[in-house]
Image (tube, grey):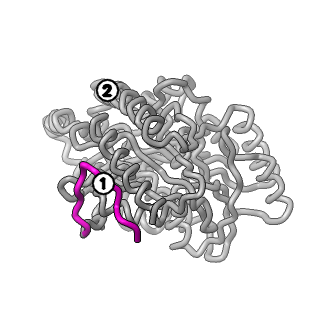
Amino acid sequence: MKNRPRSVYTYPMTIRLPVEQTLIPPGFIDLGLGDPAFSLLPLDMLRLAATDCFARGDASILQYGAEQGNGPFRQALADFLGRGYGFPVDPAGLFVTCGASGALDLLCTLFTSPGDTIFVEEPSYFLALRIFRDHGLRMVPVPTDADGLVVDGLEESLAEVHPKFIYIIPTFQNPSGQTLPLERRERLVSLAREHDFFVVADEVYHFLDYTRQPPGPFAGYTKGGNIISLNSFSKILAPGLRLGWLQADGKIIQKLAGCGLLDSGGGMNPFTSAIVREVIESGGLKKNIGKLKAVYESRLAGMESALRRHFPEAQFTTPAGGYFFWVRLPGVDTSNLQTMAEAFQVGFRPGARFSSRGGLGEYMRLSFVFYGEGEIEEGLKRLKHCLVLLSTA
């Protein structure tokens, strides 16, 4: 290895990324972390909501819950979603989950068997790919472009194989930041009904728009049975709540609510649901989303500016919402870059993790939500120094 270029920075060489998602070594800047900042977690709001909840004197919130989810909570959520989506939402079409990940796992358990084929976007959320592998599913990647899923590519795949479902993140996609246009959404819905497969739409970033409002959610297409919309409070309130929801046709809801897991344990998170109901009905959820959008829009602009200064060779499209930049560094193996970057006390997520076929080696995912603009700037400076070292090695 050639001598390291002179730098004002000195970095210990023994740093390793932590196993725990939120335990970051002092001085380490992990720009791959797709979590809200600790300073943005609404402790006071949730404490007051819990106090109000206990003041009701309703002990049923500590009992096993209804399999579909707490009824008053689903009503409050339906009212909130109706205002946000711009169309009525029936609480009977909502099913309470342990976040979007828990919903995905339950869907795989009830609607697939090992060896079944599913379609996934290329790239796709790497931890969803892990869930699918856990269930022994065969993943067929469908290409994406600047507007998200390429529906022509999907049709080509449908001519060769019939999937149980396609998993998509249609709005401010993780990792690419792309948003599927309305005409592609409608065409995908038509194909799902024509070929009889499910569209599992992970819509957790739908309410986090900063510079452009997205098309209506897939939640608006659930009647008829082929469309399942997943969402979560992890991105708009707090991930530690482990609370989300699924919106689907009544037959799907019935199968979910009747499964053995819920027959034994009751509905998911009745206690947490009761607290979040207070947050929704008080207007706290809407207020929190507004706060997050203002902070994240500023951090997005800061990361874009820093990327253009420090990585003029990088190729990326600035997202209009969500959490992530999807950056291509031509000629760079980002898995190798990640290994070296640890010595510079900076992290990101290499593109290969987001590929179901081991591709995308020149890409990396950067998140702008966990850190302020100053730390984003510093992290990208460190990453640039690392890239210079890699290129001279």
Query: Which residue is label 1 attached to?
Result: 6
Judged left or right of residue 348, residue 93 is: right
What residue appears at the point 56 percent right and 46 percent down from the top-left corner?
A: 176
Along the line of sight, which residue is nearer the eye, 190 or 35?
35
Q: Residue at x 69, y 64 (%)?
A: 140
Would residue 293 be counted in the magenta stretch? no
| Vertical position of residue 275 compared to residue 22: above or below | above
Quarter-wise, where is residue 52 in the image? top left
Based on the displayed image, in which of its 4 quarters is residue 57 positioned?
top left
Q: How far across and how far down the image is residue 341, in percent? A: 36, 60
For disc 2, the marked residue is 291
Observer able to see residue 247: no
Q: Nearer the viewer, mark 1 or mark 2?
A: 1
For residue 358, say whether it is visible.
Answer: yes
The span picked out in magenta is 1-13
The kind of secondary structure element at disc 1 is loop
Q: Quadrant of the N terminus?
A: bottom left
Q: Is residue 222 left or right of residue 342?
A: right
C-alpha separation, residue under disc 1 versus residue under disc 2 = 41 Å
Residue 350 vs residue 279: left or right?
right
Q: Nearer the viewer, residue 16 or 83?
A: 16
